[in-house]
Image (cartoon, grey):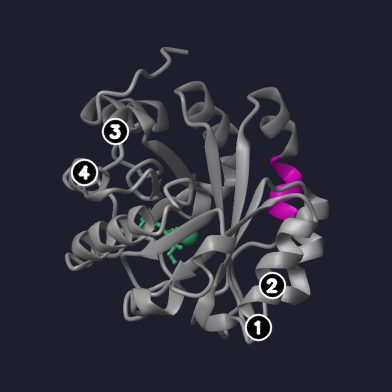
Amino acid sequence: MAALEQVQFAASILSADFTRLGEQVEEALKAGITRIHVDVMDGLFVPNLSLGSGAVIALQVLRKKYAAQIYAHLMIADPDRYVADFVQAGVDGIIVHIEACSHPFQTIRSIRSLGVRAGLALNPVTPLIMLEEIMAEVDLVLIMSVEPGFGGQEFIQGSLDKIARLHRLLVQNNLKHVKIGVDGGIHLSNAVAVANAGAQILVAGSEIFNLRAPVSENVHALFTRLRLPSSSG
Ligand code: DX5
Ligand code: ZN
């Protein structure tokens, strides 16, 4: 099980106020967020449309200023077509869906050959067995705890058991360095349980960017819940 202090939150900008995207992301970074999660949707693999590599380019100034990482979560069919684009835009990692890749080894290898981290996402219905042959080649497995496509959905409870089983599978195969990320429906109410199940990267969108409270307050609340040190800036 991952020690709680090793847990990292990734801020999904999907729920941010796009009229003030830079301002909101900077507020999150100042509060201690170190990873930005950019959700890319094509209206085909998922029913929604969202951001492209332009968002990654726009965030470069903040990425450098705060030494933050940007991961692109490609919820798109045939993601190979856009890997080079996102690397060029300045990502630290690219996450593709196993369900969207015809040749996952090729896709993962091409992402890594371009010098960035490679992540593989699994939809809620996709069993862990799909990973067995390829898990040694990835840097990150992203367990989707909602159906991909929209922010603000309810966490699928069965994901907790799936995370725990993935954690065991990685340990059994001497792959503890492969990170477990979880994406969707993460809130103050379940963040500790998700981390305790074995996740190291918790992607949070609507819990960080919402109309209830300022971004910095939301980040501090999450950090406090996990007893992580947060910055006061
Ligand atoms: C879902 C996206 C998630 C989502 C998270 O398709 O991949 O990253 O934006 O948002 P919340 O935290 O609101 O579920
Ligand atoms: Zn995502």
Question: Which secondary structure lies at badge 4?
Answer: helix
Report the magenta residues as a range: 54-59
Q: Residues within 10 Å of mark 4 (few under 14, many from 20)?
A: some
Q: Does the Cβ of the disc 2 residue fall within 8 Å of ligand 2?
A: no
Residue located at (21% from left, 43% from top): 196
Residue 171 shows which numbered tag? Answer: none
Residue 77 in picture, x, y percent from top left? 62, 82
* 13 is higher (above) or lower (below) than 42: above
Residue 228 in picture, x, y percent from top left? 32, 23
- For the residues marked 4 and 2, what is the alpha-carbon distance in whole angstroms? 31 Å
Residue located at (74% from left, 38% from top): 60
Please give the residue where the numbered disc 4 appears in the rendered image. Answer: 196
Pick whichever, 1 or 144, lies toward us: 1
* Residues at marks 4 and 1 touching, judged by CB atoms closer than 8 Å: no
- For the residues marked 4 and 3, what is the alpha-carbon distance in whole angstroms? 8 Å
- For the residues marked 4 and 1, what is the alpha-carbon distance in whole angstroms? 33 Å
Please give the residue where the numbered disc 2 appears in the rendered image. Answer: 107
Please give the residue where the numbered disc 1 appears in the rendered image. Answer: 103
- Say what amino acid the circle numbered 2 marks: Thr
Please give the residue where the numbered disc 3 appears in the rendered image. Answer: 3
